[in-house]
Amino acid sequence: MAKQFLLMEPKNENFNELIGGSSKYLVPRFQRDYAWDIEQWEDLWNDIAVLDDEGFHYMGYIVLQQKEQYQYEIIDGQQRLVTLSIIVLAAMKAIKDMIDKGEDKLENEERLSEITKKFVGNKNLVSLKLTSKLELNRNNNRFFQKICGDLAIPNSRGITSTNKLIRKCFTYFCKKDFGKTGAEVAQFIVNFSSSMVFTKIIVQDDLNAYKVFETLNARGVQLSTPDLLKNYLFSIVTKDESIDDEELDELDEQWSEMISDVGENNVSDYVRYHYNSQRKMVTKNELYSAMRKVVQTPEEAYKYLKSLIEYAPIYSSLINPNDSWWADQDPLYRDAREYLSGIRLFNIKQPLAVLLPAFKMFTPSEFVKVVKYLYVMSIRYNVICHLSPSEQESVYNLIAINVSNGTYKRASNVKNSDEFHRLYPNDNTFFNSFEFHKMPSRQTARKIRYLLAEIEGYLGNKCDYDKLTLEHICPYHPEQIWVDSFGEGVSDVKDRLGNMLLLDKDNLKRASFLEKKKAYAESKFKIANKVSLYNEWNQDNVNDLQKWMSEVATKVWRVD
């Protein structure tokens, strides 16, 4: 991880060291609400229960941004910090209950006072109001502070769902056995807080926090990039004092719906494709700094937020062609779904930059046409020819901008554009790539079935690739008779498209070619019928069949 992102090198600290010092931690005002529930509490408590055996429990990364000398914003890690704090509060309540019963009253009062100073905060000498070391977001903080101050659940009406989770969490841990005496409970807190270990990362600003998030997420450590995006946009919006709490609450709710629509792990991709659909292309690493340049005033932030919220269900449905959302759209969109399914099957994302604005700017019938063109491009360019996806993304960005600004008003403008022609592999290029194309049939059987089913459909046999069997003419693990036919090339042929076809059922198993040939002749499948015309199955005939398939493929996947 690059040092310039950070104020200091990442270091491991336990909960005692994090919260027990003089530092104060703030959850940004618009960061997500507390969301952990019984599943996470149970997992955490089970981990605490085995601490005696393991000595410590690793809690993962906590990412902080320093605001003042002893004050930090929690960029990632609030769910864990809040839950650990609630466990301490529940243990403190156990000591308070002992005090109320008169058990070792003076000693337990002193214990409770010291634990409060170390883990919760200090009381104002005049008002005796607690100043907490941990402040939550605008929706959770008041409720949480009442628990911190009173070691009891606030008796309030109209409690929100997120504060109900905090209440439920406190109640859950209050039922746990922390010890029979104040000394035992205090010892539990000491042991527990010293055993929960974090890797602490302190960043200079939110831009560097984003870079850290992207670096860690690329390594498989899922941090909350959506929170960082939200915090920035909402912090700019709220500089406009005319936006009241009711409007903020509505925006907040819409943002949550957007995350739910798109899926938290897809948010960074969504925001980038949304950005690239309207502006000069940026990479994933450039996204956050580019967004900050175009969103600097409350008006820009509000407009940007509303646009993200508006496009989210479209994006979600483009990557989920079977989404029920499509049923509520104009029936003319229906045919787009089969092309979107093909694009999705091969996990090709580059078309999204064009499809997002096309859905908004084109009529339904023109949108379906452009989806078809990009689907054909995907099969030719990405699946068969394996050409550069980064060049494709750059060119699609130019097309997307022209769609967004109204220069391209219909699908034919896209198809006939210089950009589209620059990418589109011509028939000769596509044919040559298809003729000897291989796909690892054990890993990509569903994709191969799809391609073969599209060829079958073009030849007049419409079929559902998900209900069919992929048949290897020369078996995947050939016996000696097949080795005799192919010689040294037998291991090379197993993943050739020219050695595969579709059948309803896998009845042939390890039959000879003569037996297979008879079954293929009687089959409804067109490729099988073609194979039945060969007298033997060898390398030359694999090549011949795949050449024939290539000729058909240039007609199946063609933009006229």
Image (tube, rainbow, N blue to C red):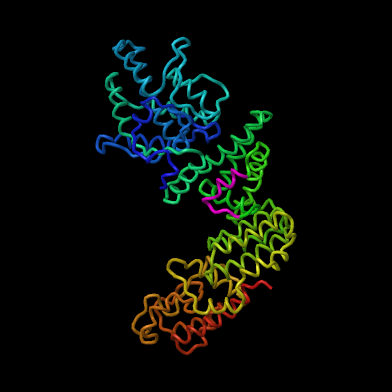
Looking at the rendering, in which quadrant would you find the C terminus?
bottom right
Q: Quadrant of residue 362?
A: bottom right
Q: Is residue 282 left or right of residue 476?
A: right
Residue drawn at the location 74% of the way across and 58% of the way down: 407
Rendered location of residue 488, percent (x, y): 36, 83
Residue drawn at the location 64% of the way across and 51% of the way down: 314
Rendered location of residue 160, percent (x, y): 55, 28
Rendered location of residue 496, percent (x, y): 46, 77
Q: Is residue 399 left or right of residue 26?
A: right
- The vertical placement of 191 against 354, above or below, is above
Which residue is at the front of the view, 459 or 274? 274
Q: Quadrant of residue 197?
A: top left
- The vertical placement of 521 against 131, above or below, is below
Q: Quadrant of residue 171?
A: top left
Q: Residue furthest front?
A: 4
- The vertical placement of 396 against 307, above or below, is below
Q: Is residue 253 left or right of residue 212?
A: right
Which residue is at the front of the view, 160 or 110? 110
Which residue is at the front of the view, 225 or 473? 225
Which residue is at the front of the view, 511 or 542? 542
Magenta part of the chain = 281-293
Rendered location of residue 19, percent (x, y): 38, 28
